[in-house]
Image: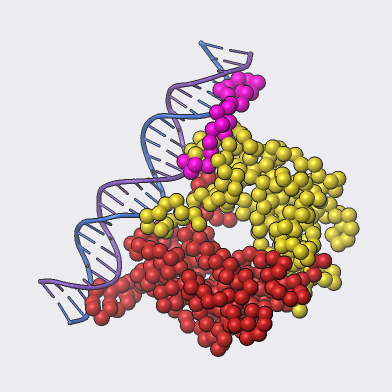
Chain colours: A yellow, B red, C blue, D purple
Amino acid sequence: MGLAGHEVLAAVLQVRAGSLQVMLWQRAREPHAHRWSLPGGALGDREDVEASIRRQLAEKVDVRQLSHVEQLAVFSAPSRVPGGTRVVATAFLGLVPSSIDPVVPGDTSWYPVSALPPSAFDHEAIVRRARHRLAAKLSYTNVGFALAPPEFTISALRALYSAALGYKVSATNLQRVLSRRGLLEATGATAPPGPSGGRPAALFRFVSREMRVTDPFAVLRPPAARSVDS
Amino acid sequence: MGLAGHEVLAAVLQVRAGSLQVMLWQRAREPHAHRWSLPGGALGDREDVEASIRRQLAEKVDVRQLSHVEQLAVFSAPSRVPGGTRVVATAFLGLVPSSIDPVVPGDTSWYPVSALPPSAFDHEAIVRRARHRLAAKLSYTNVGFALAPPEFTISALRALYSAALGYKVSATNLQRVLSRRGLLEATGATAPPGPSGGRPAALFRFVSREMRVTDPFAVLRPPAARSVDS
DNA sequence: GCAAAAGTGTTGCGTATACACCCATGG
DNA sequence: CCATGGGTGTATACGCAACACTTTTGC
């Protein structure tokens, strides 16, 4: 009769060691003992789903390290979680900058999204969804800021985008696109060159670290106004 | 702890009489008696949220008339619905082609999204979200098919897009964009001219009536492949 | 000076916009 | 033959991809 358990889950993604990875913890007990599952838990009585996922993630990582959190979708197949009580899940995408290595509990670790271990319930589908959402938003928003350190070289940024998208991105054009859109600004400082020399790379930062749509109307724009994003 | 009511709600949108309208029904009882609210109801034990919203909408309209349904977001503020039991809602966007005038119950009618009557709960926010989602998807997917009749003239299609987007769209460019992307095809037939003459308009149809992303990577495309939408 | 890495200039192409012009019908 | 509405042709603008070339360092 519409009464059901409600849980929140998050696919927390980070580019680590050159690949896009997701934070998972290993279940100790049934159901699905030893399988890997997404962090999260039951929705509390006095919180909405976003407050809830932030609270739950606080048990795994320092919440201030989460650079971005957004709702993905509801997963509600009646039998998605075995047992007497039916459980509906609200899934989130969470992002952590690559410059941070969060301290995580012992049962928790990171896995490349392209090589997940045996996953519990429908969590693999949730990770796929998160991955797809991130790739899409990298091209029409400024979410890049959520993967990047406060300051970075273009090469480093290129590596992040490549890892998240799963294919090589040109550093040249990446810089141009992000600059033209006004997302990137030079800090003035430069990074030291590598051991084999080379021109020192300039450091950049994202102008804003709030999610913003940067390519609002690919086509069918309103007549004259260009800078509307609403 | 995590046990809550779960309801599904849909903002069913249709272009009627030149404006984008939403289907609402007037509450007879408290809470929020006489205010207007979105169709929907409690999630059943044996259905997922999408099956549920389709079932609930069947009580209002012929489900076959729904040309598109998609999840919007979860609305979960603890006090969004007054009363003892906490109610979490999964909101959907539903679309009906403008050629159909569904028979609706007596307590139900259509209102322009730009001039909503006093709305129940957080339903106004849900309508805003639906409207925004529709506008966004009109520019990078083929959702247009869900607003349009099986066959239509370019002028008629222009009127639909203009109503849904809230600003004038050029018929010339609309046709070009949709044609280049391979979404539109001519039926060969023409519509009779109006009472004051004029060249008879050619009839078109959408090639596919399944949702598809048509502008997958605004930028940052994978190197060579162009037709990837995954 | 040479190799390596970073960044800029230039060109070409694909796609969208704007606007003029041609087409087909009713009166 | 004129007014009305429909459709196409053409010029222009803009943004991204590709690639060559210049800049700045270590050895």
Q: Nearer the viewer, residue B105 or A132?
A: B105
Would residue A17 be seen by someone viewing this image from the given angle?
Answer: yes
Q: Residue at x 63, y 37 (%)?
A: A150
- Looking at the image, residue B157 sits to the left or right of residue B225; the answer is left
Residue A44 left/right relative to A191: right
Image coordinates for residue A71, horizontal then vertical, percent: 66, 58
Whether residue B224 sits left or right of residue B193 in the image: it is right
Position in image of residue B3 (x %, y %): 80, 70
Asked where in the image residue B196 lies, by quadrant, the reply is bottom left
Location of residue A101 in the rendering, given as x and y in whole percent from the top left corner: 75, 39
Residue A131 part of the magenta-drawn span: no
**Span colored in magenta:** A180-204
In the image, residue B143 above or below residue A166: below
Q: Most extreme residue toward the bottom, as rendered?
A: B106
Do we see residue B184 in this rendering? no
Q: Residue at x 57, y 34 (%)?
A: A204
Residue A48 position (above or below residue A101): below
Which residue occupies 57% across, 72% down? B11
Q: Residue at x 55, y 50 (%)?
A: A212
- Is A192 contained in the magenta span? yes
Image quadrant where one finds the N terminus of chain B? bottom right
Q: Name the quadrant containing residue A14.
A: top right
Instruction: Provide residue B128's location: percent of width, then percent of height.
Output: 55, 66
Q: Looking at the image, how many numbered discs can be counted on the residues?
A: 0
